[in-house]
Image (tube, rainbow, N blue to C red):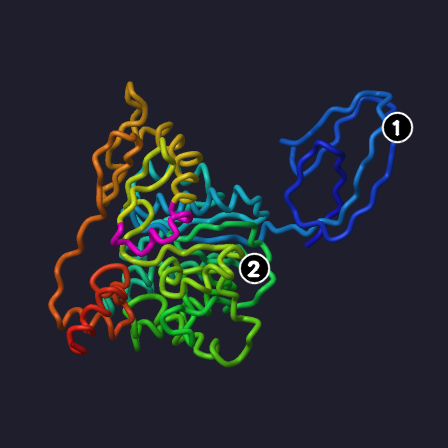
Amino acid sequence: MTMVVFWYPGSTYRHKITQWSSIQILIKSDSAFQTRSAKYCHLLKKGCLVTLYMAIVCLSGDQSFVTLATNDSYVKGALVLGSSLRNYRTTRKLTVLITPHVSEAMRTVLEKVFDEVKLVDVLDSGDSAHLALLKRPELGVTLTKLHCWELTQYSKCVFMDADTMVLSNIDELFEREELSAAPDPGWPDCFNSGVFVYRPSIETFNQLLQLATEKGSFDGGDQGLLNTFFSSWATTDISKHLPFIYNLSSISIYSYLPAFKAFGMNAKVVHFLGRVKPWNYTYDSKTKSVKEDAQDPTMIHPEFLNMWWDTFVTNILPLLQQHGVIKDAATGVKAEEVTEAVSHLSLSAAAMPHSPPSPPAMSSEERKEKWEQGQADYMGADSFDNIKKKLDTYLQ
């Protein structure tokens, strides 16, 4: 859909211009010129000579970025993602799916960043999604994520996990077709489901539910299910392979450091894979950096973590304070738990050091099962250094 708009220097517009020209007019009477919305009306006085620009504008109201927040912890990630999309002036709508585990206070904050906040309650749906959950209870979060295909008010969407952050405008992704995604660093013949382009469709939604019910997921999550459903991705159409810069895995930075040094500056989306998320770290507002841990491979290049926290402190923290999620203290920001999760908002240089929580110990069989499901703990027990040490014991 297209429309013709007029604007002049100083006015604001957000849509993609496909064709433009300019004219000069002399204002013969006081007149209001409206650009994108009434918010940007400007009053021009009689006698002004003004250059007006006429443009054919591509309307993008039927397209949206979509993310999912299953609890208050992931709301923080979703808020930073939404804020980063706004910062780089996306022209598309922003939609977030939430579950009943998200608190009312956090829902209110989400409404300040996103155009649409949609509650998805699979347990209370009474439909095929509920039946699928009864048969496959382990796919609870996956079945919730599949509801993004129900957003049929949009012609095309880009889904992004809440632990991603954009580093530049990525609206060009809407020029891709379903299902477009970047290769997964662990098995490049599979795509990573943290960022993908899709077309909402009730038919596709029902087919995905049927597959989930009948076959489940080979990795226990949405990525295995989606790769099974879109099984031709690896071989059929290379145009549906997004460059890795649209889903730069944080764990890939240290697993292939030379490539990151050569191409990392072109990254458009960073994906904080792994157990420890950005909101699990301690941030020092005076040094504007997270507390470094020599054992954490993410700290080889902590700039993305610092960028995440800078966005959080600058854009999100004031909203959390405004809505009472975080209280102001006499000395500044009070370091306290924002959600039920593990992270602390340590915004004082004098704050006590805080390390990410240690995961519960797993048996050898449990670890083997995780490996077979593609869920190795790359940042912990299964890190490269630990694997190398184990191999060294056999080679001695």
Please state if 148 lies on the left or on the right of 388 as rendered. right
Q: Nearer the viewer, residue 75 or 34?
A: 75
Q: Position of residue 301 (x, y in %)?
A: 39, 52
The label on residue 173 is 2
Q: Is 52 part of what is drawn in magenta?
A: no
Instruction: Give the amino acid at mark 1.
Output: Leu
Q: Position of residue 223 (x, y in %)?
A: 36, 68
Q: Nearer the viewer, residue 99 or 244?
A: 244
The label on residue 26 is 1
Mark 1 crowd level (few <14, some 14–19, many ≥20, 10 Å Cα): few
Which image quadrant for residue 329? Answer: top left
Q: Is 304 part of what is drawn in magenta?
A: yes
Q: Kindly give the residue lying farthest to the front in the view shown.
A: 396
Secondary element type, mark 1 = strand
Please state if 392 lies on the left or on the right of 92 as rendered. left
Quarter of the picture holding the N terminus: bottom right
Q: Kindly give the residue lying farthest to the top in the view shown.
A: 330
Instruction: Give the amino acid at mark 2.
Output: Leu
Residue sitting at x 20%, y 62%: 381
Secondary element type, mark 2 = helix
Quarter of the picture holding the C terminus: bottom left
Residue sitting at x 35%, y 43%: 76
Residue sitting at x 32%, y 35%: 284
Residue sitting at x 38%, y 57%: 250
Alpha-carbon distance for marks 2 and 1? 41 Å
Q: Position of residue 12 (x, y in %)?
A: 67, 36
Please state if 19 lies on the left or on the right of 298 as rendered. right
**Residue 209 visible at all:** no
Q: Nearer the viewer, residue 325 or 185?
A: 185
Q: Are marks 2 and 1 in contact (CB under 8 Å)?
A: no
Instruction: Please give the range of residues in magenta.
Output: 294-305
